[in-house]
Image (spheres, rainbow, N blue to C red):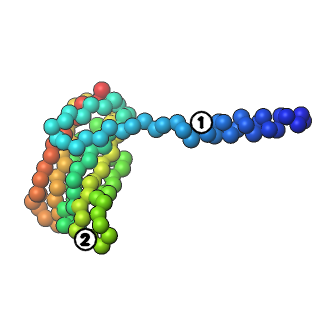
Amino acid sequence: MNKLAIPVLLLVIMAGVSIGCFQQTPQIKEYTGASQTIEVEARGQFTIVLESNKTTGYSWEPSFDSTLLKVIKSDYKVAQSKPGMVGVGGKEYFTFEAMKKGDTKVTMTYKRPWETGSAEQKVFNVTIK
């Protein structure tokens, strides 16, 4: 094998790996207000982000048509605060995938799981193209 072939081959491999590392993943659009209409392509994704404070026992619960949407990820992130602070709120993130074309709604209910009533409700209109 040629002495130059190995370094060239290594350069080609390293270039391929570095290009793969810098490819950006598609941005998933975030929605924070129920007044926003969510438009998404079939098989596309979107995230609903809502203020929350799980230290109170309250959390957001989504309700939606499971033939058109599915939750693929949910997460809670505590807001930055000074060390030692308790009772700090944060945000809940719900990432949905659109299954097929259609119009639907996502109803987000802020409640304690053990209670029947809710503190707040937000309805998001979704158009899947």
Residue 48, horizontal then vertical, whole percent: 26, 45
Residue 33, horizontal then vertical, whole percent: 18, 42
Residue drawn at x 33%, y 29% as measured from the top left: 41
Bin the neighbour count of mark 1 within 10 Å (Cα to Cα): few under 14, some 14-19, many 20 and up.
Answer: few
Vertical arrangement, residue 115 with respect to residue 5, above or below:
below
Q: Quadrant of residue 42?
A: top left
Residue 51, horizontal then vertical, whole percent: 21, 53
Residue 31 in sight: yes
State the residue position of label 1: 19
Q: Quadrant of residue 10?
A: top right
Residue drawn at x 25%, y 41% as measured from the top left: 31
Taking depth in this image into account, of 103 and 122 the one nearest to the observer is 122
Bin the neighbour count of mark 2 within 10 Å (Cα to Cα): few under 14, some 14-19, many 20 and up.
Answer: few
Q: Tag on residue 69?
A: none
Q: Secondary structure at mark 2?
A: loop
Q: Secondary structure at mark 1?
A: helix
Q: CA distance from mark 2 to mark 1?
A: 43 Å
State the residue position of label 2: 86
Residue flagged by tag 2: what amino acid is it? Val
Report the number of discs: 2
Badge 2 or badge 1: first in the primary sequence? 1
